[in-house]
Amino acid sequence: MVSFTTSLLTSIPLVASVASAFSAPAAHYGNYSIVNGFFKQSDNSTDPKTFDYKENLGLQDNLTWSEFKDQIDDLNANADLRVDYKVFFFARHAEGYHNVAQDYYGDDAWNCYYSLIYGNGTSEWGPDAYLTEKGEAAAVNNSKLIKSLIADEFPLPQAFYSSPFTRAADTLVLTWKDLVLDTGYASPIFKESLRETIGLHTCDQRRSKAYLSARYPQFQFEHGFITAETDLLWTKDEQETDEGKFYRARSFLDDVFASDDSTIVSVTAHSGIIAGLLSAVGHRKFSLATGAIIPVVVKRESRVDFVPVQQDFSVTIGPSSTAPTCATAISSTIPSDIAYSTTSVNEAKSVLTVTTVVSATATSN
């Protein structure tokens, strides 16, 4: 038997301008796809706008949670040596103050002005927006939902990953505190690759590792987590593209499949990166409301031609996209003297270069 183990010594999200760095052979050694038939969200007949995840998390009516777990175990037990399966519960953070502001001002005014500042004098949403009271209550309700499902033999996740933003971590804590954190069952891990779309919006500017460490003592940090006081990946001038999020999501999947033997995995993150994760595994587009959860069964097929190597490659973090086009913004709601420019930002910027070491080993039995 041949098995592969990859250690991503530094795992950081990259913008679209360096998306090709994720195509290095040592990082991409498998193909991902979803397994249909388990959850209603993967059915084309299910309307994301009207679907209620609180109805048994979307498990098909002909299945119980016990039967579901048995079928996943059977898939792994009978799989080809190159194939394995994981179940991901992708959870979007509950409502944050930035969500309220966007709803209040509208998308145009939000994207072209209000998302670029830190608050309006009444409410603050940057950096790293907190949950609202409504959001906190929704996360607590998710906890009650999970507890009711456990009574029906819901398979408790064996690993928990979180975006390094407070709105995601707080959602995770409020959802899983009694079941996971207080019992010592598992210690959630902060992953840079799970953060929201990088750049422009102040709500997507990360707080420091020191702040997160003090606020979440029960969490771990992935190896290589950036320790700088300022967010080195965030820029006020440009925003990551969908392509960039796709490759960043793919790097997370590569990392988890290589380093984590867990079959059931919880991920608490954001709408943008969850869309990237769904795209990376070939799932249909399925937008999530704040606080919503989508389960996905993922099949990973290892590449037959994969040759384990140790490889150092440089990652350049710099301009990845352009500023939004704001011609359609509602001018009456945006101060004209400081509204964001309607022209694209394309002047040269300084870049940050990070060296990532990827090692891989193979064993034959």
Image (tube, grey):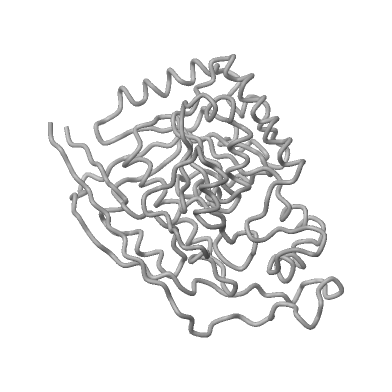
In-image side of 307 versus 149 (left or right): left
Image point (60%, 50%), residue name:
271
In-image side of 261 versus 204 (left or right): left
Query: In this view of the protein, which residue sits in the foreground, 168 or 323?
Result: 168
Image point (64%, 28%), residue name:
143
In-image side of 355 versus 291 (left or right): left
Q: From the top left corner, tell me how far across and down residue 161 is, in percent.
A: 48, 41
Compared to residue 325, the image places residue 136 above or below, namely above
Query: In this view of the protein, which residue sits in the foreground, 203 or 89?
Result: 203
Q: From the top left corner, tell me how far across and down residue 156 is, in percent.
A: 50, 24
Quarter of the rendering containing residue 57: top right
Q: Furthest-left residue in view?
A: 365
Q: Furthest-right residue in view?
A: 332
**Rendered-image quadrant of the N terminus:** top left
Compared to residue 333, the image places residue 216 above or below, namely above
Q: From the top left corner, tell me how far across and down residue 286 is, in percent.
A: 61, 44
Q: From the top left corner, tell me how far across and down residue 120 is, in percent.
A: 79, 64
In-image side of 360 versus 262 (left or right): left
Image point (58%, 38%), residue name:
172
Compared to residue 357, the image places residue 63 above or below, namely above
**Rendered-image quadrant of the C terminus:** top left
Image point (64%, 64%), residue name:
202
Compared to residue 336, the image places residue 8 above or below, namely above
Query: In this view of the protein, which residue sits in the foreground, 71 or 111?
Result: 111
Quarter of the rendering containing residue 298: top left
